C-alpha cells in the first residue's frame, strides 16, 4: 500500500484576541491590588485565630507593627522584637505616645473616639512586649484596639 | 499596545497581595480615675472563669490543665449556665428588660473571664485563646440574634454600619446594642506576670 505523505501544517493560532485577554487580566489585578501603605522593616507572620472579623474600615485605623527586624535591618536594630510605627522602628514603647498624639491631630477631634489601633504583631513575639504596648495605649486613653490575625486554626496547635 | 498592557499586568501581578485584614477587636479597660483598693472590688469566685497561659504556652482553666478543643463550650456553659449549676456563673435576679428582646426570657450573666499570661507566653497562643473566646461570644450572640431578629449577629452588625439609610442603620445598631448589653464580652485581660526566669 502506498501512503501518500501529506504535510499537515498546523494553522497558526490567531493572536488577535491576546490584547483583550491581557487587558482583562490587567483590569482584574488593578482593581484587586491594594498598595502597601508602609515599607515593613520588621518581619510579621500573623497568628491564627479560629474566629476573627473584618475591621469596619469606615472608621479610622492606624497600625502598629511588632516583630523581629528584617535581615537588612538587623545590623542596626538587632534581632529582638521591635516596634515599628509608620515608617520607622521606635527605640522603645514610649514612641507610641507621640504616635498616638500625631494620629489624633491627623484625624481630627471628632474622630478620636472612633480610632482603632490595629496591632500587627508577629506570632512568635513574647507577650511582654505586647503588654507594654497595651499598657501604653491604655495610659493614653486609646482603648479601641484590634489584634491582626489570620482566620483559621493553627496548623501547629498541639494542645 | 499589548506590550504595554503586559508590562502593566506584570507589575500588578507582582505587587498584588491577597491577604485581607482579619482582626480580633477588643476594648481596653478604662483608666481608673482613682486606684480602687482590691478589697473594694468583690466578685464571687463562681463568677470568675480564670484562664492562665504559662510561659510554656500551656493553658490552665481555673487552676487545672485545660483543653483548647473544649474551651469554647466551657466558656459558653460558664456564661449561660443552662442548668443553674451553683459552680458556674450567677445570673441576674430579674429578667433583662429591653424593648427589643422578648420579655421574661433572658437573664444577664454576672460571669467574667480573666485571661492571664506570662511575659514569656507566646503571642501565637494568646491569640489562639482570644480567638476561641471571641468565637464563644459570637455563637451565644448569634443564638439570640437568630431567635429575636432571624439574622446572624454579623449580619446585624454589617447592616448597622453599611448603607445610606440612616434610619435603618440606627435600627440595626440598636439591635446590636441590645445583644451586646445582654452578652457583653466580659473578658478581663489582666496584666501579664513577670516570669521568674528571664
Image (cartoon, grey):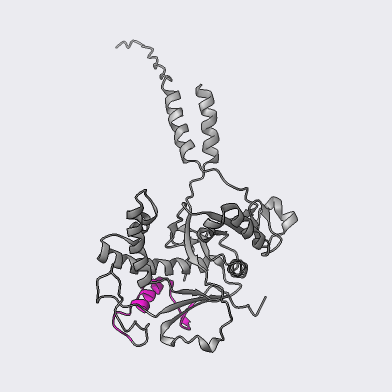
Q: Is residue B98 left or right of residue A114?
A: left
The stretch of residues the image draws in magenta is B60-85
Q: Is residue B87 above or below residue B32?
A: below
B92 magenta-colored: no
Classify residue B102 by image quadrant: bottom left
Q: Is residue B91 above or below residue B1?
A: below
Q: Is residue B99 above or below residue B91?
A: above
Q: Is residue B81 above or below residue B140?
A: below
Q: Residue at x 49, y 67 (%)?
A: B27
Residue A27 in picture, x, y percent from top left: 45, 33
Between B182 and A20, the residue placed more toward the observer is: B182
Classify residue B141 by image quadrant: bottom left
Between A115 and A13, the residue placed more toward the observer is: A115
Residue furthest right in the image: A76
Q: Is residue B119 left or right of residue B95?
A: right
Residue B47 in picture, x, y percent from top left: 41, 83
Residue furthest bottom in the image: B39
Q: Residue at x 51, y 37 (%)?
A: B13
Residue A43 in picture, x, y percent from top left: 61, 55
Residue A40 in view in this figure: yes
Residue A67 in view in this figure: no
Amino acid at each position: 500500500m502506498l501512503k501518500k505523505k501529506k504535510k499537515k501544517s498546523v494553522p497558526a493560532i490567531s493572536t488577535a484576541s491576546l490584547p483583550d485577554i491581557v487587558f482583562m487580566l490587567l483590569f482584574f489585578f488593578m482593581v484587586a491590588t491594594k498598595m502597601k501603605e508602609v515599607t515593613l522593616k520588621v518581619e510579621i507572620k500573623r497568628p491564627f485565630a479560629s474566629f476573627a472579623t473584618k475591621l469596619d474600615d469606615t472608621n479610622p485605623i492606624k497600625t502598629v507593627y511588632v516583630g523581629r527586624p528584617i535581615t537588612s535591618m538587623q545590623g542596626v536594630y538587632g534581632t529582638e522584637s521591635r516596634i515599628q510605627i509608620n515608617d520607622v522602628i521606635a527605640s522603645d514603647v514610649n514612641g507610641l505616645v507621640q504616635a498616638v498624639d500625631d494620629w489624633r491631630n491627623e484625624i481630627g477631634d471628632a474622630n478620636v473616639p472612633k480610632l482603632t489601633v490595629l496591632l500587627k504583631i508577629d506570632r512568635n513575639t513574647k507577650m511582654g512586649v505586647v503588654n507594654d504596648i497595651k499598657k501604653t495605649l491604655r495610659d493614653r486613653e486609646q482603648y479601641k484596639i484590634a489584634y491582626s490575625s489570620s482566620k483559621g486554626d493553627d496548623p501547629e496547635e498541639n494542645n | 499596545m499589548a506590550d504595554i498592557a503586559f508590562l502593566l499586568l506584570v507589575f500588578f501581578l507582582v505587587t498584588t497581595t491577597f491577604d485581607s485584614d482579619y482582626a480580633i477587636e477588643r476594648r481596653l479597660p478604662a483608666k481608673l480615675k482613682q486606684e480602687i483598693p482590691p478589697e473594694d472590688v468583690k466578685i464571687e469566685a463562681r463568677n470568675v472563669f480564670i484562664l492562665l497561659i504559662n510561659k510554656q504556652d500551656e493553658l490552665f482553666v481555673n487552676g487545672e490543665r485545660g483543653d483548647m478543643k473544649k474551651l469554647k463550650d466551657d466558656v459558653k456553659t460558664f456564661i449561660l449556665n443552662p442548668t443553674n449549676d451553683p459552680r458556674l456563673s450567677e445570673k441576674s435576679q430579674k429578667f433583662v428588660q429591653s424593648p427589643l428582646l422578648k420579655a421574661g426570657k433572658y437573664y444577664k450573666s454576672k460571669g467574667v473571664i480573666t485571661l492571664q499570661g506570662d511575659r514569656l507566653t507566646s503571642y501565637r497562643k494568646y491569640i489562639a485563646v482570644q480567638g476561641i473566646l471571641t468565637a464563644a461570644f459570637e455563637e451565644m450572640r448569634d443564638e439570640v440574634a437568630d431567635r429575636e431578629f432571624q439574622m446572624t449577629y454579623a449580619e446585624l452588625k454589617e447592616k448597622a454600619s453599611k448603607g445610606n439609610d440612616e434610619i435603618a442603620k440606627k435600627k440595626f445598631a440598636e439591635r446590636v446594642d441590645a445583644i451586646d448589653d445582654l452578652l457583653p464580652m466580659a473578658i478581663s485581660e489582666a496584666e501579664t506576670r513577670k516570669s521568674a526566669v528571664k
